[in-house]
């Protein structure tokens, strides 16, 4: 069986069959990796630029738009992090809602880590506080450039999902993890409760770089891709989510090889050239973006071909296209899949399903560090059932999802009723 290991979400690593899996050390941003998005903008510390008040709790946001699927958008505009943190922000949810996703996009220069922090329910329960997301009742992981927090992500948090005013702060830190003043776009997508058991739908945008001859033209008849998409589709149907017929999109030249990496460090961060690739989703229609590349090297210690895929975030900003975290990248290499031993299976379908699972908000069921996800119906590290789960850190040919994992996927606002 082909082994793959994913030691630090959202990075996937495969080893040669029979050899120990290669750890994927999540990279850190290079010091010069900053990109000016909004050159020369003076950060007006401590004050929301628009739609806000000075300091203190803000009025609940105004719903600016309602999407076809009934998802409401609350736009809090541009928010400033003064000394690393914004003032408290808030918005309201109603009795017919089942969850929401907050999406942050940096409008400042440099690679900044953003986080939806100090997230409090209407009853005052603190669901996410500080960067140690493993401790959160509903995880909110810091991410570079663009971050999303899906609420609710856990059993406990689900009990806490009550109508009323939710509050949070936006925090920002620089590549040295020091508090940073930043200008951050903040939007909240509120999803109404869907009928229990009703099938939902997910749109797919497939982006082709020409890797291994795979193009938007050849994709409909490419056997390996079609088999993988069939497996991906089956995994999600099991979770009550039907995948739409994918839209096939052609990337500009130069994206078949993602080679740039950061220095080694901990944290869910991806390379800048990968970020440039994910930004190519800017004009894509709503849906999950999947980018196929031929070479994906984000860490000099991991050999070429060893990283199978990477998600832009956990969850990623699924409702905002064109950010450096708007999608997942999956390897489709020149060697194609060649079975080497009896029982070897092509994991492309599971890789697609697994990375999209991360992007929609699923953690690994366990990490080698001993951390486990927040869902009570997923198995722990030493239980055989855990390794059969789609979100096991070592993905193989199994791909089951538990009811709470399916609920988490279906709670994401990009998944439509
Ligand atoms: Zn993973």
Image (tube, helix red, strand yellow):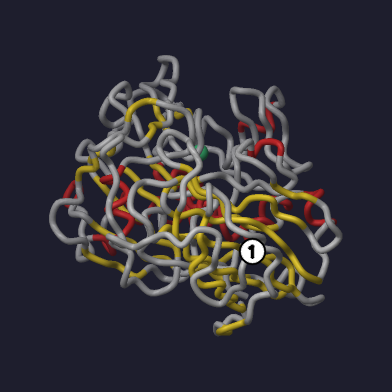
Residue count near mark 1 (Cα–Cα under 10 Å), binned few <14, some 14–19, many ≥20: few
Check the image and report above or below for 371 versus 159: above
Ligand 1 has an atom within 8 Å of the beta carbon of the residue at disc 1: no
* Residue 250 or residue 225, whichever sits in front: 250
Q: Is residue 219 left or right of residue 194?
A: left
Q: Is residue 374 above or below residue 82?
A: above
Percent position of residue 352, x then y = 44, 49
Residue 96, image x, y percentages: 78, 77
Q: Residue at x 68, y 38 (%)?
A: 373
**x and y percentages locating residue 111 in the rendered image:** 37, 46
Count every numbered label the image shows and give the total.
1
In this rendering, does residue 358 appear at all?
no
Q: Which residue is mark 1?
A: 55
Label 1: state its secondary structure.
loop
**At x 43% / y 41%, what residue is drawn?**
174
Q: Quadrant of residue 75?
A: bottom right
Q: Position of residue 71 (x, y in %)?
A: 61, 77
Vertical relation: 86 (above or below) 173 = below
Which image quarter: residue 287?
Answer: bottom left
Q: Residue at x 43, y 35 (%)?
A: 12
Q: Is residue 62 left or right of residue 301?
A: right
Q: Is residue 227 visible to us here?
A: yes
> Which quarter of the image is occupied by the C terminus?
bottom right
Q: Nearer the viewer, residue 297 or 306?
A: 297
């Amino acid at each position: 069986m082909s082994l793959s290991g994913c030691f630090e979400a959202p990075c996937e690593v495969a080893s040669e069959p029979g050899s120990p899996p290669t750890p994927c050390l999540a990279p850190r941003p290079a010091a010069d990796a900053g990109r000016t998005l909004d050159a020369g903008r003076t950060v007006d510390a401590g004050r929301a630029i628009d739609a806000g008040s000075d300091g203190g709790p803000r009025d609940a946001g105004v719903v600016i738009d309602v999407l076809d699927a009934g998802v409401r958008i609350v736009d809090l505009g541009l928010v400033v992090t003064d000394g690393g943190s914004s003032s408290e922000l808030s918005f309201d949810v109603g009795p017919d809602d089942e969850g929401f996703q907050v999406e942050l996009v940096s409008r400042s220069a440099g690679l900044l880590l953003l986080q939806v922090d100090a997230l409090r329910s209407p009853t005052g329960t603190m669901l996410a506080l500080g960067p140690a997301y493993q401790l959160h009742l509903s995880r909110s992981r810091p991410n570079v450039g663009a971050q999303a927090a899906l609420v609710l992500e856990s059993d406990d948090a689900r009990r806490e999902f009550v109508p009323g005013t939710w509050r949070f702060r936006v925090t920002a830190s620089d590549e040295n993890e020091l508090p940073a003043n930043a200008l951050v776009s903040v939007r909240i997508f509120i999803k109404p409760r869907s009928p229990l058991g009703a099938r939902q739908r997910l749109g797919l945008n497939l982006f082709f770089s020409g890797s291994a001859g795979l193009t938007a033209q050849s994709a409909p008849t490419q056997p390996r891709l079609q088999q993988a998409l069939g497996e991906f589709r089956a995994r999600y149907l099991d979770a009550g989510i039907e995948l739409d017929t994918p839209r096939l999109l052609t990337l500009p030249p130069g994206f078949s090889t993602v080679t740039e990496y950061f220095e080694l460090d901990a944290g869910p961060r991806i390379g800048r050239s990968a970020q440039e690739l994910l930004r190519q989703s800017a004009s894509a229609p709503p849906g999950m973006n999947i980018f196929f590349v031929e070479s994906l090297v984000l860490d000099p210690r991991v050999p070429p071909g060893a990283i199978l895929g990477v998600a832009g975030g956990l969850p990623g900003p699924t409702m905002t296209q064109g950010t450096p975290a708007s999608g997942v990248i999956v390897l489709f290499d020149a060697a194609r899949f060649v079975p080497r031993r009896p029982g070897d299976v092509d994991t492309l379908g599971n890789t697609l399903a697994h990375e999209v699972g991360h992007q929609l908000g699923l953690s690994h069921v366990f990490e080698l560090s001993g951390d486990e996800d927040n869902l009570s119906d997923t198995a722990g590290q030493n239980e055989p059932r855990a390794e059969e789960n789609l979100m096991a850190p070592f993905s193989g040919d199994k791909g089951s999802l538990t009811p709470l994992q399916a609920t988490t996927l279906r709670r994401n606002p990009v998944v439509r009723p």
